[in-house]
Image (cartoon, helix red, strand yellow):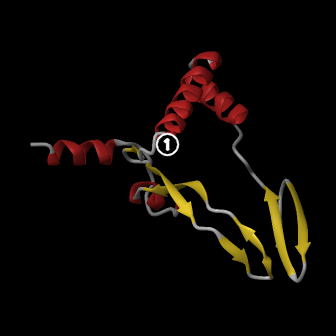
Amino acid sequence: MTFTGLYFLYTFETRAFLITNCNTMTSEKLFNSLHQKKGYGRILLENIIKSAIMEIADQLKKGEDVKIDGFGTFKLSTIKAHRLSFDANIIVPERTTVIFSPEDHLKEYVNGESEDFSLKKTQQYKILTNR
């Protein structure tokens, strides 16, 4: 097994967890990549992306799902309170978390089943279904 980047092994009781930070696209890397590939101003890109992320967070906070056509859907999910399996005295309280469900087009691209990841397929589908 080969790892790149920072990683460490954490053991708790008899369970072992591998925590990794391998090949992570940070916001800084994203801004720079888009700046180099598309030629847009870095500050403009940073403001647009941060504004989009804040809008997604605001909608989720209101309890709304956020669907980005051709990409996927962000939803809230409630995890019920439960006891830890290895120590019944510890109760983990109920909490809400964000889940992301990618669209099939994104899955196909990531799995190498599609050569092109553009929103063209989604846009063509919307045109056909909105008669």
- Residue extending farthest to the left is 131
Which one is in front, 53 or 13? 13
Q: Residue at x 54, y 60 (%)?
A: 78
Pointer 1: what residue? 60
Q: Residue at x 59, y 28 (%)?
A: 50
- State the quadrant of the C terminus: top left
Q: Residue at x 85, y 53 (%)?
A: 5
**Residue 19 placement, left or right of 24:** right
| Residue 55 image point, x, y percent | 50, 31
**Residue 85 placement, left or right of 6:** left
Which one is in front, 105 or 130? 130
| Residue 4 image point, x, y percent | 83, 57
Which one is in front, 78 or 123? 78
| Residue 105 image point, x, y percent | 40, 55
| Residue 129 image point, x, y percent | 16, 48
**Residue 102 placement, left or right of 17:** left
Task: Estimate how packed mark 1 is, as few (under 14), some (14 to 19) or many (20 or more) residues with alpha carbons within 10 Å.
Answer: some
Q: Dividing the picture into quarters, in which one does residue 89 lie?
A: bottom right
Q: Residue at x 42, y 47 (%)?
A: 65
Which three-letter amino acid code belongs to the residue tagged 1? Leu
**Residue 104 placement, left or right of 21:** left
Q: Dividing the picture into quarters, in which one does residue 26 lie?
A: top right
State the count of labels: 1
- State the quadrant of the N terminus: bottom right
At mark 1, the secondary structure is: helix
